[in-house]
Image (cartoon, rainbow, N blue to C red):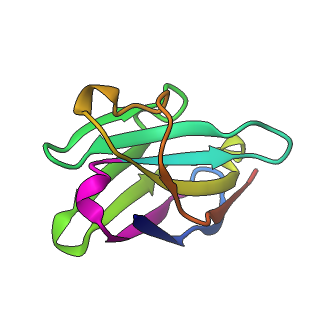
Amino acid sequence: QVQLLESGGGSVQAGGSLGLSCTASGDTNRGACMGWFRQAPGKQREGVATIWIRDGRTAYASSVKGRFTISQDNAENTVNLQMDSLKSEDTGMYYCAAREGVSWRCSIGSPFDYWGQGTQVTVAS
């Protein structure tokens, strides 16, 4: 089992920045693919970014590419999401997730096995 705990988030004006962190505990070797997802009110959950912990390979949804950066801190078992140039449409609950399995299936389109409780991000226009 892998436990995930998000931190960060909050409220910001459009054009501003926020950072999220996700700390993994438990059997962290099982969740080599880490990702961030978000869900806006009344909308389906969507993938934001993924990172393959073993080589740092990253991937992003087109809606956030160039604005968001996912990174890892292996010493702290932490994955971060730096969000810049925020827009009102970035508002939502952000979830950290981990997936077992192979690197070529580490993508926002794959099912993830472990989820955090979520942290709220609100961007005011």
x, y percent for residue 69: 36, 47
**Total numbered labels:** 0
Q: Is residue 20 above or below residue 38?
A: below
Residue drawn at (70%, 46%) of the image: 39
Residue situated furthest right in the rendering: 42
The N terminus: image quadrant: bottom left
Residue drawn at (24%, 33%) of the image: 103
Q: Is residue 83 above or below residue 77?
A: above
Q: Is residue 98 above or below residue 50?
A: below
x, y percent for residue 118: 61, 63
Residue 85 in view of the camera: no
Q: Which residues are magenta?
A: 16-33
x, y percent for residue 97: 47, 52
Residue situated furthest front in the rendering: 1
Q: Is residue 85 above or below residue 124?
A: above
| In-image side of 66 versus 88 (left or right) | left
| In-image side of 106 versus 95 (left or right) | left
Query: Which one is in front, 31 or 76?
Result: 31
Membership of 21 in magenta stretch = yes
Membership of 18 in magenta stretch = yes
Residue drawn at (25%, 33%) of the image: 102
Residue 116 in view of the camera: yes
